[in-house]
């Protein structure tokens, strides 16, 4: 499809997918771009890390983002949560994130889930997801999400930041270790740490 020219007051804007992604098409090609457009990513935890992931996934052209979070925006969030602003204070994070992301790309599909892992049903959404990014703060929620992803066969990127430290860990179900394998949460009772087959037990 050719470029479309829109006249927005005194500014002429070129709007087309080929123009929007021109800087990355040499890297991933039209097929890669199409795959991104057809992809769904569930981001659990819309904070400094999860929010930045959501923004860059949207910028790259991922077609559908599912945002999961249970809190509201507070003043100390604003030093790093770039999807939020002053007017977001006191409002649900997922709603504010959705608002910013929709303004960023009107073609982006955004689904919001207000709640915690384990308290809301994620089965429907995990069936749609090509990838999960786990940026939740709470470790119990991380273990629950790990178990759901492994059982449903959804790849998951474990991501965490604390102070100057960062933790990144890929969970590829049934091909490599998962969070349970790594941390052996219930090792004495339920099995063995890294090196044994776990599949989230
Ligand atoms: Zn495991």
Image (cartoon, helix red, strand yellow):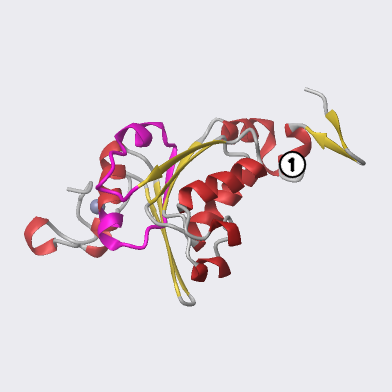
Q: In this figure, what is the number of numbered marks? A: 1
State the residue at coordinates (52%, 34%). 39
Estimate the x, y position of residue 141 in percent, counting from the top left. 28, 55
Q: Is residue 1 above or below residue 167?
A: above
Q: Residues within 10 Å of mark 1 (few under 14, many from 20)?
A: few
State the residue at coordinates (8%, 64%). 188
Q: Please state if 118 lies on the left or on the right of 87 as rendered.
A: left
Residue 174 visible within the image: no
Q: Circle 1 sits in a helix, a strand or a loop, which is it?
A: helix
Q: Please state if 144 lies on the left or on the right of 57 as rendered.
A: left
State the residue at coordinates (10%, 56%). 190
**Direction top: furthest residue:** 1
Q: Is residue 106 above or below residue 94?
A: above
Q: Nearer the viewer, residue 118 or 75?
A: 75
Q: Nearer the viewer, residue 50 or 183?
A: 50
Which range of residues does the magenta coloring cover? 115-143
Within the magenta stretch, is there residue 139?
yes
Q: Which residue is mark 1?
A: 26
Q: Is mark 1 within 8 Å of ligand 1?
A: no
The answer to which image quadrant residue 155 occupies is top left
């Amino acid at each position: 499809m050719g470029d479309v020219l829109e006249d927005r007051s005194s500014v002429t804007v070129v709007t087309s997918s080929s123009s929007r992604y021109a800087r990355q098409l040499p890297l991933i090609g039209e097929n890669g771009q199409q795959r991104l457009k057809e992809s769904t990513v569930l981001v659990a935890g819309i904070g400094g890390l999860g929010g930045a992931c959501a923004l860059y996934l949207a910028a790259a052209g991922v077609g559908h983002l599912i945002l999961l979070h249970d809190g509201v925006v507070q003043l100390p969030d604003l030093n790093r949560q770039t999807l939020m602003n002053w007017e977001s204070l006191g409002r649900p994070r997922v709603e504010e994130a959705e608002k910013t992301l929709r303004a960023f790309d009107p073609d982006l599909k955004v689904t919001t889930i207000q709640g915690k892992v384990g308290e809301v049903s994620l089965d429907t959404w995990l069936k749609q997801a090509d990838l999960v990014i786990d940026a939740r703060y709470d470790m119990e929620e991380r273990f629950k999400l790990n178990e759901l992803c492994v059982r449903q066969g959804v790849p998951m990127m474990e991501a965490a930041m604390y102070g100057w430290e960062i933790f990144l860990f890929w969970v590829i179900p049934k091909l490599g270790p998962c969070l349970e394998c790594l941390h052996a949460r219930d090792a004495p009772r339920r099995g063995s740490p890294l090196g044994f087959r776990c599949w989230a037990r």
